Image (cartoon, helix red, strand yellow):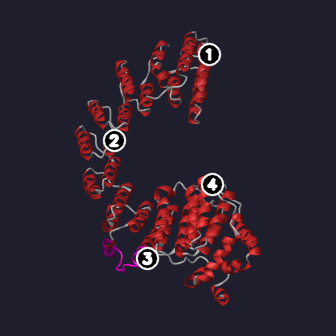
Amino acid sequence: MVSHVHEKDQSHSITASTVSEVKSKCVVCLGNNGCRTVHARTKLMNILIEKGKPQEAHSIFNSLTEEGHKPTVVTYTTLVSALAQQKRYKSITSLISKVEENGMKPDSILFNAMINAFSESGNVKEAMKIFQKMKKSGCKPTTSTFNTLMKGYGNIGKADESSKLLELMLQDENVQPNNILIRAWCNKKNIKEVWNVLYRMVASGMYPDVVTYNTIARAYAQTRETYRAEQMILEMQNSKVAPNERTCGIIVTGYCKEGNMMETLRFVYRMKELGVQPNLVVFNSLIKGFLDVTDTDGVDEVAFDASHNDKRLGLMDKCQEIFDDMVKADIEPDGYAFSILAKGYVRAGEPGEAESLLDSMSKFGVHPNVVIFTTIISGWCTAGKMEHAARVYEKMCEIGVSPNLTTYETLIWGYGEAKQPWKAEELLQVMEEKGISAEKSTMLLVADAWRAIGFLSEASRIVKNVDRGVASNNTDEIPAESLEKVYKKQNLTAAYSNVLQIPGVAMPDQNGSSATKAIIQMVLKKYDSSSVFLAQASVFGVQPAIIWQNQLTRRDRMHGQFHHWTFGNADDSKAKL
């Protein structure tokens, strides 16, 4: 039961108002001729409630009675909404008697508003008490009354109680149940009871609509029985209910989530027979389905015949083909479609193709967000081409898309894989200037970067800062001798010299391949479909390239050779060695 703050004060204010109502001084109100002041104040209460100011609406109600006006039933109904928003439910229960004391009769709208308030709060027991008062007062329950109660029971997981209400509804020929009870049983994944309810509705002369069938289709798809959702189309046609885009979208998405791409494509072709044109949801589901599919044998049959190493690239060819078909059908892709493609190209080891999508997005007027930029950056990091990752980062900042923690952690991990821990640590300062706090995971990535080239003392320095809760964001604190050791290590390790001389190319690592897969899957998983629509861009004026260049210029004064090794070409480095 929800606790109610200031409940006594609220009840007192209503009681005081009621006294004023009895001693109404307004001649118009006493004559029940429709007072303009009451009408205007009631309208104002509704406006305040819509603006999320229920307390002010309540004050307006009190001012009415204090000035000697008599609120109408409509005014009391509006007051119910104000009290419900304030979670002052105890005050609601006394309103019926107050209305009656003032010589008015509560109508079904007032009763339904009270029932809805308690149902939404989860107190269906109190809602049923109002329902009984409603019937006892001679006010006939409406379709809305029953649907609200059934929704309340459904919300608290008591669909069986909703079924009892259905029986009452079916006894009244003027009341038409909708899909609330169907949805309640679907949420409990009790499909058998869903059909029982549906058959009882049909037997009483009430027929399901497309929303009813779509609700059931979604339940089948959620239980990985999408084929049953498709079979239901025949029953829909027999009932003269035509499947719509939503019906087909549910089935396509269901097959894709099951990894059954053969059935997905078959059904997409069937959509034409049903008279339904594939929409953006269907195309996006298809693209994502091919990327997420795990049944590679099935994919080969549907899409192409490719070697094991080229299967992912072949999948992207298929995805691009679907994307092109979508454009040809005059369906404009959205940010989600581009994000899916970018993730696919990164998985296929083609970050360049992923980056090229940024140009395509501008042609369609779609603004890239932090999700797609971070996905592309992760692709370049995985490929070991950190200069490309840095370029994408700079472009991201230039167009006003603000990097987030995942963006920076991806870059830090990339520099760690590329054996450039000093650059990984420099990013901590960039983060600080951007107003993004480094977390423990961020600092441990920096420590891992130092550890990867054998500098355990530097890794220990970072870890100690983590333990103290201090982020080492000042890159000038990196000991000069540490940088000199890196340079010496380069000269001493002939086998790795070529790798170290080329910026952004990672040193071979026995565990590198699995580590790469782990981090890229982490980034891609973080930016899966459920988060795409929530990513938003904002403007930052800091130019990261300038920060990095300034830091490197300062260090160049002390370590000229080190600067040349980092930014010089491979041939020059070989000549020096």
Structural crowding at the residue carrying mark 1, measured as other residues with C-alpha within 10 Å and reported as few (<14), some (14–19) or many (≥20): some
Q: How far apart are marks 1 and 3 (CA)?
A: 76 Å
Image depth: mark 1 or mark 3 in front: 3
Tag 2, which secondary structure? helix
Q: In which quarter of the image is residue 52?
A: top right
Residue positioned 63% across, 85% down in the render: 570
The correct choice, above or below, for 503 with respect to 405 in the image is below
Question: What's under tag 4, amino acid-wise?
Answer: Ser
Image depth: mark 4 or mark 3 in front: 4
Whole-percent x, y for residue 79 in the image: 53, 25
Residue positioned 55% across, 84% down in the render: 495
Q: Give the range drawn in magenta.
A: 297-315
Residue positioned 51% across, 58% down in the render: 532
Residue 415 visible, this angle? yes
Image depth: mark 2 or mark 1 in front: 2
Q: Earlier in the sequence, mark 3 or mark 2?
A: 2
Q: In this view, does 487 lie to the left or right of 240?
A: right
Q: Earlier in the sequence, mark 4 or mark 1?
A: 1
Tag 1, which secondary structure? helix
Residue identifier under label 1: 66
Structural crowding at the residue carrying mark 2, measured as other residues with C-alpha within 10 Å and reported as few (<14), some (14–19) or many (≥20): many
Q: Is residue 512 left or right of residue 248?
A: right
Q: Is residue 89 left or right of residue 198?
A: right
Q: Distance between the residues labelled 3 and 2?
A: 43 Å
Whole-percent x, y for residue 171 in the image: 26, 30
Mark number, residue 184: 2
Q: Does the segment drawn in magenta span residue 302?
A: yes
Tag 3, which secondary structure? helix
Whole-percent x, y for residue 139 in the image: 37, 22
Question: What's under tag 1, amino acid-wise?
Answer: Glu
The extreme top residue here reads 23
